[in-house]
Image (spheres, rainbow, N blue to C red):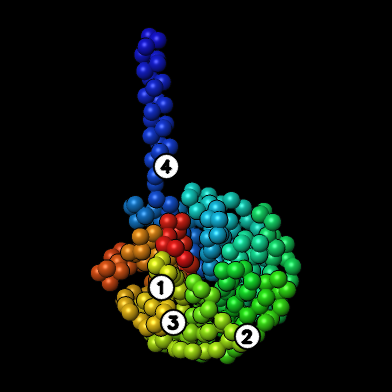
Amino acid sequence: MKIFSIARTCVALCGLWLSIGAAEAAEPPLFVLNSLEANVSVIDPATWTETTRIPTGKEPHHLYLTPDERSVIVANALGDTLTFIDPRTAQVQRTVRGIVDPYHLRFSPDMKWFVTAANRLNHVDFYRWDGKDLTLVQRVATSRTPSHLWIDNRSTTVYSTMQDSDELVAMDLATQTIKWRIKTGAMPADVYGSPDDKRLFVGLTGSDSVEVFDVSGREPVSIKKIKTGNGAHAFRAAGDGRHLYVSNRVANSISKIDMTTYQVVESYPVPGGPDCMDVSADGRFIYVSSRWARKLSVVDTETKKVVRQVTVGKSPHGVWTLHHAPR
């Protein structure tokens, strides 16, 4: 009897170890933010099914994976809240209240500053981060409709586009003051910095181009407009340190830009108003929210085709996953 009991115990322990190993080996989920349903779709990348929806605050618009990769943060613009989610288990970690109109969001790479763009209220907020709590330090009035944010690799400068005044604004992190502003093309949206921090790429949603700025000197200079497609909007790095994807929301396409030659080198058709993106760890697949089709679309960059679509909620916007190409 003792032998059988020991055997059963060994089997049970082996089963437990196997289940733990399987859990650790499982691919982390994809998160798709549904702006008009106040929730996040959780997608299993093994079965490509929606496993659950996580309630958030009103009108969530953007997701952000913290630099330490411990949390996916959902910015709930009309809810004045942030929802922290575990990127591995899809469990809600906590809700932070009193964050005014967080439309777009970003941590500084050194994790000392957290910045939000108040799209409706025309200001950018600077918060100190102590590893646990956010403390508002400064609220900086800007031009009309601050849209997207970028912070340089040295954690010194915040860049923000102004959607309705057609501007790019630079702000000093240490002093929370505006350093300069420059006019852009029509309706600037997302902004992305080159790996050496010398160039900024701005998606012109009211046009068909990405505008390139040289920000290496005392004053910024517009040096190029790269024609990509109508409604150039959101960026994601390809992961090789050289190429950048931009979604052309009106043209229903994604363009691949060479950041050294300022040329479009590839184009991928994507239906339904492609918006925010993430890229698989091996760089082969682009995960993109098809904003007007209520779909997550998966693009194979080798075949240049949409190979899979998953139905999600209304007006899907942000897309993030833990297993991603370097950003």
Q: Which label lies toward us, 4 or 1?
A: 1
User: Can you give x and y, in whole percent of width and height, for residue 34 in the image?
Assistant: 48, 65
Image quadrant where residue 30 sits: bottom left
Badge 4, how many Cα within 10 Å: few under 14, some, many 20+? few
Q: Residue at x 41, y 73 (%)?
A: 242
**N-terminal of the two: label 4 or label 3?**
4
Marks 3 and 2, the one that precedes in the sequence: 2
Is 226 left, or right, of 304 in this rendering? right
Q: How many marks?
A: 4
Amino acid tagged 4: Ala
**Cα gap from disc 4 to disc 1, whole angstroms:** 34 Å
Amino acid type at image mark 3: Ala
Q: In which quarter of the image is residue 209?
A: bottom left
For mark 3, what is the residue? 232
Residue at the disc numbered 1: 242
Residue indicated by mark 4: 23
Tell which circle, 2 or 1, labels the residue nearer the N-terminal end. 2
Marks 4 and 1, the one that precedes in the sequence: 4
In the picture, measured across the screen, residue 199 lies left or right of residue 309, that is right
Determine the secondary structure under disc 1.
Answer: loop
- Mark 2 neighbour class, 10 Å CA radius: few under 14, some 14 to 19, many 20 or more: few
67 or 251, which is in the foreground? 67
Q: Where is residue 76 in the image (x, y as percent from the top left)?
A: 59, 66
Residue 54 visible at all: yes
Label at residue 218: 2
Q: Is mark 4 on a helix, strand or loop?
A: helix
Q: Which residue is drawn at 34% across and 56% down?
A: 48
